Image (cartoon, rainbow, N blue to C red):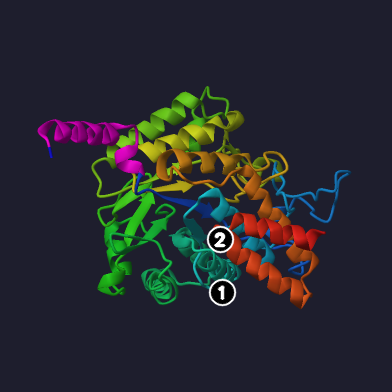
Amino acid sequence: MKPRTILLLAALLSFILAAPGASHAASKIVMVYYMPWYTAKPYSDGWGWHWTMNHFNPDGVNASGERQIASWYYPLIGPYDSSDPAVLEYHVLLMKLAGVDGVIVDWYGSANFLDYGINNQATVKLFQFTRKAGLKFSICYEDQTIQHMIDGNYLAAGDAIFHAQQEMLYLQMNFFSDASYLRLKGQPVLLNFGPQHFMMSTNWEDIFSVLVATNQPAFFTEDNRLPVSTGAFSWPPMWMSQVPGTGGVLSGAALKSYLADFDQKAGNWPAFISSAFPRFHDIYQRAGVRNYWGYLGDRHGDTLRETLSRGMTNSSAIVQVVTWNDFGEGSMVEPTQEYGYRDLGIIQDFRRQYLESDFSRNTNDLTMALRFYNLRRQYLTNIVVSAELDRIFTNIVSGKIEVANLQLDQLTK
């Protein structure tokens, strides 16, 4: 090869690598943070706390046909049960069409205390569908559960470490060994929302000591890294909205300052996770549950665009979208009556821009998931149509969109 040709190729390669985000985004994993805690009629006997917060009555329906739920926003399919297979199919189809790589589930453990056991069962069901859709999954462990169990006389304080060890063994047996479980450099990725109970790094060393060497986790805590951790993840810093003079509103300047500070300290860690989010508008104060947590405006999608852009272009190993479906805090990207498919469309655009230039899905494709869901609901007891819907599901997740659309058209004639 001629020297001039070599120089030109080297210059071209240098330009490509210098492009914004090019050196980091190519290997990014995009996950969505998922809440498995909803209970709803008619799938279950009653309405769970996360739809009612002991204040709202979902049996009450307004003139628009919407139920009264604990949220400022209304799911496109209405309030649902997290264990309903039709709902789980709908969710994973949306994720696949949106260009999401998988889910991180908010996990309260497996204990039969409060709704922890029910939520865990819903998590197990969700993972059945993420596997079918070719999506990855991971866990964010809530160690605040330990104190709740101690306060509820379910767990003795002296057994706290032992109980957490048993939860880790549960994860190892049921999730960590799964081929679909998210791993980073060979280690299963485990997040902790906190820590809120086990504050010492040595606590976590004891907790993880029961795991085999191949399942020692790539461990991420919130905001700050513990010595035992691989790194940490960012989160909407709503505590900043409580500073006197802010009026309970998290400003754009404060948010940018928080994210810049997080990225700076995270640059010294082995790895970190960036969070992207569309807004924060919780219903807690209106429900009388707790004090006002603050407000982060949607800004016509710009909050999501800016936080997602940062995650795509910094050196984070993983981007997590916060959240898929926390309707209580109003941070969901799941389609709603208010925002439609807009947020998932933004994720599609960013996947195309930073990760996969030939990613061809668009917001029109997202409507397939709702068509599929409605047909599944309509023909739940029809064996023939159910089998055809199974084939359509396979075609959608395999990228055979035109074929799947034709099949859906046939069923809706």
Residue 259 place in picture, x, y as percent:
39, 34
Amino acid carrying label 1: it is Asn
Question: Is-magenta flag for residue 285?
Answer: no
Question: Is-magenta flag for residue 12?
Answer: yes
Amino acid carrying label 2: it is Val
> How many discs mark residues in the rendered view?
2
Q: Quadrant of residue 215?
A: bottom left
| Residue at 27% over, 61% down | 202
- Residue behind mark 2: 397
Could one spot residue 70 in this view of the protein? yes
SS type, badge 2: helix
As drawn, which residue projects farthest toward the left? 3
| Residue at 77% over, 69% down | 45
As drawn, which residue projects farthest toward the front? 2
Above or below, 341 relative to 377: above
Q: Nearer the viewer, residue 264 or 411?
A: 411
As drawn, which residue projects farthest toward the top? 245
Position of the C terminus, as image quadrant, is bottom right
Other-residue count near label 2 (Cα within 10 Å), few / some / many at <14 / 14–19 / ≥20: many
Residue 77 place in picture, x, y as percent:
73, 53
Task: State which tag comes first along the sequence, 2 or 1.
Answer: 1
Circle 2 or circle 1, nearest the eye:
2
Is 44 left or right of 138, judged from the image as shown? right
Q: Which mark is residue 112?
A: 1
Q: What secondary structure is the magenta-colored segment mainly?
A: helix
Separation of residues labelled 2 and 1 (CA atoms): 34 Å
Is 334 left or right of 380, judged from the image as shown? left
